[in-house]
Image (spheres, helix red, strand yellow):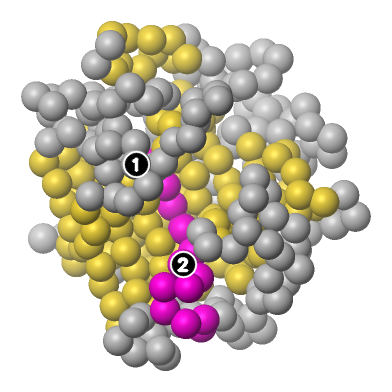
Amino acid sequence: MRAPATNRPAFQATPPFVVEQEAGATEWKLRTYPGPEAPREHDFVGPFINPNTGLPNVLTLQCAVPGVGHRNLSEVSSPPLTNSGVPGRAEFNGSALVLAYRAGDPPSSEKCRVQVNAHAVPTRRVVTWALGVQLGDAANPWPMRPATTAPVLLWQLKADVMGMTTFPSMGLFVDTDRDDATKLRLTWFRREQNTKSPEIREERGGLDPGQRLDVVIRAILDDRDDGIGEVVVWVNGTILGGHFGRTLIQGLAPHRWAFGLYLMSDANPVPYTYVTRWTAARMC
C-alpha cells in the first residue's frame, strides 16, 4: 500500500476555531497570549512569519538563543520570533528548515530541545502529516549513543493543560538500534491513557544515520471509544503501523503537534550536537 498524496494545500486553522471532543464542541483560541486572532497555516518549511498575516504560523519555537539562553519564541516574546528564525538553532537553509541542538545548549522545561510547536488541530476529519527529515549531516554526524540511553523525539501530538502533566497521544522517536550500534531505529508510539508508558509501539530498525526519512501519518483524531478514529503511519513508502479506534487521550484538549529535537532522557546540557534537516513538515 502506498502512502497517500500529500500535495494538497496545508491545513489552515481559521477563527473561530472549533474542536470536537467527547464532552462537546469547544472553541479554542489560536494563540495563548494577547493579540489578534488570525488564520494559522500548518506548513513550516518556509518563513516562520506568514506574509499574508504578518504573524507566525507557529505557536512557539523553543530553542536556545545565543547570548540570551533558552526561550519559547513568539511574536510577543523577548526576543521575538523572526522570519529567519534563530541562527545555528532554527534557520532556513535552501529548501529546508535546519533544527539543531548545539553541544552545551541549555535545557528547556527540564529537557534539552529545539522544537517547533503548532496550533490546535481539528478532530473528526482526515488529517495527514508529511514529514521529511535527515538525521545529521556531513559536518555533524548523528551522535550514536548507546541504545535506550538517549532517544530523541522527532514528532508528537500532545495536549498542554495548565497545571497538569500530560503525555503525547502519539509520537515518533529515534534511537540507536539495539541490534546494530551503527544503525538507527525509528519508533512510533500511541497512548490511550495519560500515563508515562505508551500502550502501543511499532518499530523499524536498520536505518542508516544521515539518511532521509519520509514519514506520512494519516489520521482521524477522535477521543470517543465508539468514534471513527484511525491512524496509519508510513516510513519511506511502507507501512510502519496503524490502528482503528480511539486515537486521542480522553479529557485532554486541544491537541497540538510539534516536531524537531526533544532529547527525552537529557535533562542537562550534553556534549553532543544534534542536527536535523527538515525538507517537509506540514499537515493537510
Name the quadrant of the C terminus.
Answer: top left
Instruction: Mark 2 and mark 1 in contact? Answer it, CB < 8 Å.
Output: no
Question: Magenta part of the protein: which range?
Answer: 144-157
Measured as percent of width and height from the top left, residue 187 is found at: 32, 64
Measured as percent of width and height from the top left, residue 158 is found at: 42, 38
Q: Earlier in the sequence, mark 2 or mark 1?
A: 2
- Is 216 magenta? The answer is no
Residue 51 visible somewhere in the drawing: no
Mark number displayed over residue 9: none
Towards the viewer: 43 or 203? 203
Amino acid carrying label 2: it is Pro
* Distance (Cα) linking label 2 and label 1: 18 Å
- Of badges 2 and 1, the one in the foreground is 1
Measured as percent of width and height from the top left, residue 264 is found at: 51, 59
Mark number displayed over residue 151: 2
Residue in view at x 55 percent, y 40 percent: 117
| Residue ID for mark 1 | 195
User: Would you place residue 251 above or below residue 208 in this image?
Assistant: above
Residue in view at x 36 percent, y 64 percent: 214
Label 1 element class: loop
Label 2 CA crowd tier, 10 Å (few <14, some 14–19, many 20+): many
Residue 156 visible somewhere in the drawing: yes
Amino acid carrying label 1: it is Thr
Measured as percent of width and height from the top left, residue 119 is found at: 51, 30
